[in-house]
Amino acid sequence: MVGGPRRRRRVRRRAGARCGGHHGSRRQLRRGLSRGRGIRRAARGRPAALGDGRRVALDQGGRRFHRTARPLRTAVPPGVITLLALGPSVDVTYLVDEFFEGGTFRPTGVYRAAGGKAVNAARAAVTMGADVAVVAPLGGASGQFALDDAVAAGIPLMPVWATADTRTCISISSAASGLLTELYEQPSAITGDELARLHEVTDTLLVERPGWFAISGGVPASVPVGGLAALIDLAHSRGIRVAVDSHGPALAAALSTRPELLKINRAEAAEALGIEPQADLFDSAFGMAERLRGITGGTVVITDGVAGSYAVDERGRHRAEWSGDFGRYPVGSGDSYLGGLLASLDAGGTLADALRLAAGCATANALVPGAGRFAKVDALAIADEVVVS
């Protein structure tokens, strides 16, 4: 058990008081967030081979990507992003030589990290230099592990301690077949009182952190879809832009709140519109994006794996394409895409800039095992060669 019962209770009391528990205060929450900034600054103090005009060669699976000496269009200064993780998890990735049903296998590599879509997106945004804070319900020893891992990665995570243990999501990558097997627990249940505390902590952060508010990932069955819409309305009442990356009933509820940015994949877009994806990827993706923009009034981005991404805003259609190595570890690539997209937009980048950086983050993520564990230099090098038309 991570941390042991005594240590976990002690840390939980401190974290709960600091981050909106029964005895929390806005001053204590600010102190907790400041500590997170300090951790992130220390992490950014490490040497990094980027932004200096040097030529960088990246070797992934025998292929090389070369970054030219010209200044990168996609470099981003820090931004301000607040994410709500209603379905956090401990993500475990097993690498095996081969995998089949009914067998016994010895992993050649094991990667454990705080995860869930919002946390993965936050990890990517932090990697790209953004100022990020995450609010998440956490429970049990697995929740304590998720908190410790996030802090160690420089992600300020504001926990609301919950009754249910934080879930575990397992991915098994087979070298022989190249296939990925995924075992994902449902998002852990959240009680009404816990949801109210999540609202309180989120509101405190939004007051002090103008910028973007993002809701990413699935919503526990115990949370009414109206609760998600209420959180988005809360952000809008503070004058804050909202980004949504979700699916199912939660996505349907979010559409009516008119978020400024909607980022979903092609299957989720078709489900939201109640249609079957068309055979022509190009026309159907843009067609779905335009229909969704007609509902939200904001920017809509639809991702479609190796086919690239399609975006529609007030200026029209945009497509981002990458022709290099797509990697063999796609878990977390969509989340990394969102993190890069928000990091660029919040820093004042154009949509074209944001699409390049997002594609760079998503692709760099797929080159290494473990969600959101890519290097900034890899993402920037790839982003500089992404074509946006």
Image: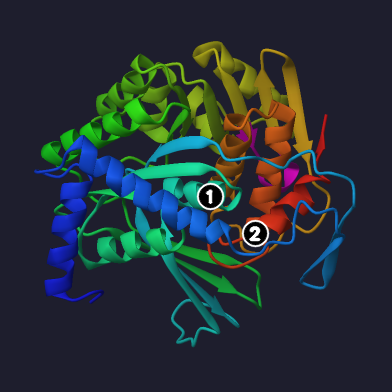
Q: Does the magenta stretch include residue 303?
A: yes
- Give the structural element (helix, strand or loop) at label 1: helix
Mark 2 neighbour density, 10 Å: few (under 14) some (14–19) many (20 or more)? many
Residue at image position (70%, 53%) is 379
> Looking at the rendered structure, which numbered label has been put on residue 126?
1
| Residue 253 percent across, percent down from the top left | 36, 23
Q: Which amino acid does label 2 sit on?
A: Ala
Q: For the C terminus, give its image quadrant.
A: top right
Is residue 223 in sight in this rendering?
Answer: no
Residue at image position (17%, 50%) is 16
Q: Which of marks 1 and 2 is in front?
A: 1
Name the residue furthest right: 69
Is residue 83 in sight in this rendering?
Answer: yes
Towards the viewer: 100 or 167: 167
Q: For the N terminus, give its image quadrant.
A: bottom left
Magenta residues, as a range? 302-309
- Give the structural element (helix, strand or loop) at label 2: helix
Residue at image position (17%, 59%) is 12
Q: Which amino acid does label 1 sit on?
A: Val
Task: Give the mark, 1 or 2, whose residue is nearer the N terminus.
Answer: 1
Q: Which colour scheme is used?
A: rainbow
| Residue 49 percent across, percent down from the top left | 74, 61
Q: Distance between the residues labelled 1 and 2?
A: 17 Å
Mark 1 neighbour density, 10 Å: few (under 14) some (14–19) many (20 or more)? many
